[in-house]
Image (cartoon, grey):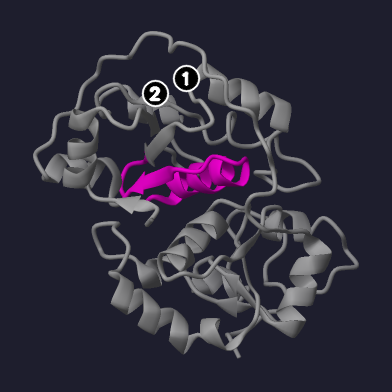
Amino acid sequence: MTALVDPDALATLLRRGEPEVVLLDAQWELGGRPGRELYAPAHLPQARFVDVDVDLADPPGPRGRHPLPDLARLEKTLRRLGIHDRTTVVVYDQATSLAAARAWWLLSFAGLQDVRVLDGGLATWQRAGHPVTTDVPGPAIPGTVTVHPGALPVLDAASAAGLARSDLLLDARARERYEGRVEPIDTVAGHIPGAHNTPMADYLEPDGRFLDRERLLAYFAARGVFDHGEVGTYCGSGITATHLALALRRIGVNAAVYVGSWSEWITDPDRPIATGPDA
């Protein structure tokens, strides 16, 4: 089963009413407007807002800018949203699925079996002629989901470094950040030694949808994804890393995510830092 769903397929799924679907709106801007301000003027009918910074991460600190959330708190959040163990969850954001991918990865990591992402997000939904609303749904009937972490592979700093040496670690940040030419967010520029750069923009259409499967296969094959036993992803704070993991899932690769990513890596001055272009 693909984790991506297009607008027409989602509309059909919602009309059928089977299986039960919970829609989550994860609209988010890095350093921009709060997600609720993006949700308020337009969202899918019956979609419930989920806050990437609050619901899907713990506060910034030594574990990075978007560390894994406390799992007991995550379970309470999912139950508040009306999610059960066998609920189908569809999540979306404005267009690129960047924040939606974090929700997809986290909920899948927590043990949910059917989590999907609306490819192209709210923008594609509207272009397809489907309705949006400003109405906020009332409180959900509480769900009964139980979080069982570990359903997807996770890296820490040591295993990410080891993967960069032995197999393949992919850095999802923009090329200039990977090379250390600029660093607009974190305090240190550069990348994990041995990592290779696969910027998010390379595997998206201009409108924010993922490239089709054949072009994704060609893109990642050219970067050696199928030449290694294990593949890992990281970025600045663990958001884009999950987006890259979603793209890889599309072609059948189950990548491990370094959730702490660069923002955690640089908290230890003994960890090495590389700069310059991809080898």
For residue 48, which numbered disc appears in the image?
Answer: 2
Residue type indicated by callout 1: Gly
Q: Quadrant of residue 89?
A: top left
| Residue 90 horizontal side relative to residue 102, left or right | left
The amino acid type found where label 2 is placed reads Arg
Q: Which range is magenta?
A: 92-118
Quadrant where the N terminus is found in the figure = bottom left
* Foreground pick, 144 / 175: 144
Q: Residue at x 65, y 76 (%)?
A: 230
Most foreground residue, 205 or 29: 205
Q: Residue at label 1?
A: 82
Q: Where residue 70 appears, x then y in whole percent?
A: 73, 32
Q: Which residue is nearer to you in this view: 217 or 100?
A: 217
Task: Say if 250 sits above or below 26 in the image.
Answer: below
Q: Quadrant of the C terminus?
A: bottom right
Pair 2/1: label in front: 1
Q: Is residue 60 above or below residue 40?
A: below
Residue 68, position in %: x, y? 69, 42
Residue 96 in view in this figure = no
Q: CA distance from mark 2 to mark 1?
A: 10 Å
What residue do we see at 57% from left, 68% from top? 177
Give x and y (percent) for residue 112.
54, 39
Which label belongs to residue 97?
Answer: none
Q: Secondary structure at mark 2?
A: strand
User: Label 1's element?
Assistant: loop
Whether the residues at callouts 2 and 1 have beta carbons within 8 Å, the answer is yes
Report the residue at 77% width, 41% height from top.
61
Q: How many marks?
A: 2
